[in-house]
Amino acid sequence: MTDVNSPSKNPEEDLVTRFPTAYTILFLLIILVAALTWIIPAGQYERAMNEEVGREVAVPGTYQEVDPNPQGFVDVMLAPTEGFYDPHSYAANAIDVALFVLFLGGFLGVMNATGAIDTGIRSAMHRLEGREIWMIPILMTLFALGGTTYGMAEETLAFYAILIPVMISAGYDAVTGVAIILVGAGIGVLGSTINPFATVIASNAADIPFTDGIVLRFVLLIGGLIICAAYVMRYAHRVKGDPSRSVVASQRDAHRKLFLQGHDELDNFELTGTQKIALVIFALTFIVMIWGVSSQGWWMAQMGSLFFGAAIVIGLIARLGEKRLTGSFVDGARDLLGVALVVGLARGIVVIMEQGMIADTILHSAETTLGGLPELAFINLMFWIEVGMSFFVPSSSGLAVLSMPILAPLADFANVGRDLVVTAYQSANGLVNLINPTFAVVVGGLAIGRVSYDRWLAFIWPLLLILTVFITVVISVGAFL
């Protein structure tokens, strides 16, 4: 009798699970949303330009039903393509994110060709032997800072291929590496303080200063970070003591083969001068990326160009030669091609919902439900309505522009501050985006980490329950302050 928990002779087979792939899940969601456009009445609010937000926002009290536009077979088949760009107007949707992912993969491929990352990992593990567990809260804090200040999300895709080998080398698993990045940045967004893509846009749409409610958001940020770091550290400690307790225990050999590429069998801890220079450029690339996004208005095109240029510089310094440089870049891009495709599929769900004109109908139902409720019931129902809407609109800025102009004014009738509505919105969106299959950052990060969606759910569901209770307590207290 074969032990299902033991690895097979072919480690690559252990990466295959019976759970559907991200591609299948996302395509089924496209079909589901298309089916909803035949059931949910089509409707729209009138839109008006809000100069402070910089976008058109819904006007309260203007909802009306419109002629339905149910999405059929052809629309479903076009959705993955339209997820990348609008074939009618040629306006970009997620094509910029997909190209960024490919440039990132090429950059990592060139960096791996220098051997600097492998040697650097061995050196770091040698120096931190016995104290590796403290990397978890430190790194999660750094990612949380990125999340709370500028909504770090797609940018995190650059870090998975770097951090997961470090965690596996330290005796943990791939899930630990994924959790540090995804949960770390996610709790920062959940507890956004000055995040321009969530707190600032939502506050402007709610017609309040973004500093209103900032104390409560700091409570969510700090308390949530402590909870998440403790949870990941506890899991990592348990896995290191007994690898069979990992949620991806059956994939352990396959993950080691894939991410470590045999470096753990070598004894060389010394970096060459060229490798040290390559690592310095590697680190500076990420520093420049963070600087550009947070202060210079950079987005995917600029970040992709940065990684493309850095790959060329590293390849020249390492004297890889033209053929090895281009070959390493193409091989690296090929490794992340699946992630790039997932990005388009995830965006295709939003395209179907927008074309079917059901988003405003869902919002109008929420508006009707919330009217006249007492403080405690109002703010908690507001949170759960935003949770539901976040599955269909994973973008923090998109959800803010859609929901805040309509839902925030309702707080005046419930004797609740509008700032608390903003806090409930960003908490709900941040919580859902830890598992949201329509969010490219989730499915993309899991794809890079070779962690199936069902294994991620097995790891994170207790944490979601803890965070839900924590958020509920915080916003409930806030309703009476």
Image (tube, rainbow, N blue to C red):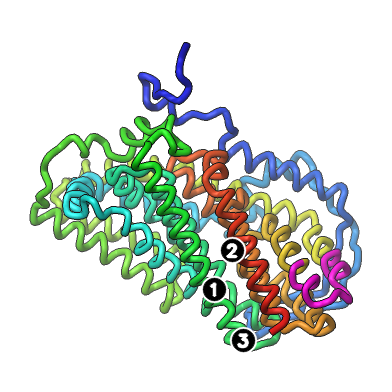
Report x, y in % for residue 3. 45, 19
Location of residue 358 with respect to 109 vertically, above or below: below
Circles 1 and 3 in contact, beta carbons < 8 Å: no
Q: Which amino acid type is shown beneath numbered disc 1? A: Ser
Q: In percent of the image, x 61 and y 83: which residue is there?
A: 213
Q: Is 157 displayed left or right of 344 in the figure?
A: left
Q: Which amino acid type is shown beneath numbered disc 3? A: Asp
Distance (Cα) linking label 2 and label 3: 19 Å
Picture disc at residue 212: 3
- Which residue position holds label 2? 430
Find numbered disc 3 in the image and state the secondary structure of the residue it sits on.
loop
Is tag 2's residue or tag 3's residue first in the polypeptide sequence? 3
Find numbered disc 2 in the image and state the secondary structure of the residue it sits on.
helix
Q: Is 63 displayed left or right of 341 in the figure?
A: right
Find numbered disc 1 in the image and state the secondary structure of the residue it sits on.
loop
Q: Is 39 displayed left or right of 291 in the figure?
A: right
Q: Quadrant of residue 418?
A: bottom right
**Mark 2 residue crowding within 10 angstroms, few (<14) / some (14–19) / many (20+):** many
Is tag 1's residue or tag 3's residue first in the polypeptide sequence? 1
Report x, y in % for residue 427. 62, 67
- Which residue position holds label 1? 192
> Does the stretch in magenta take in 21?
no
Please state the extent of the stretch shown in magenta in the rendering. 364-380
**Image quadrant where one finds the C terminus:** bottom right
Report x, y in % for residue 24. 62, 36
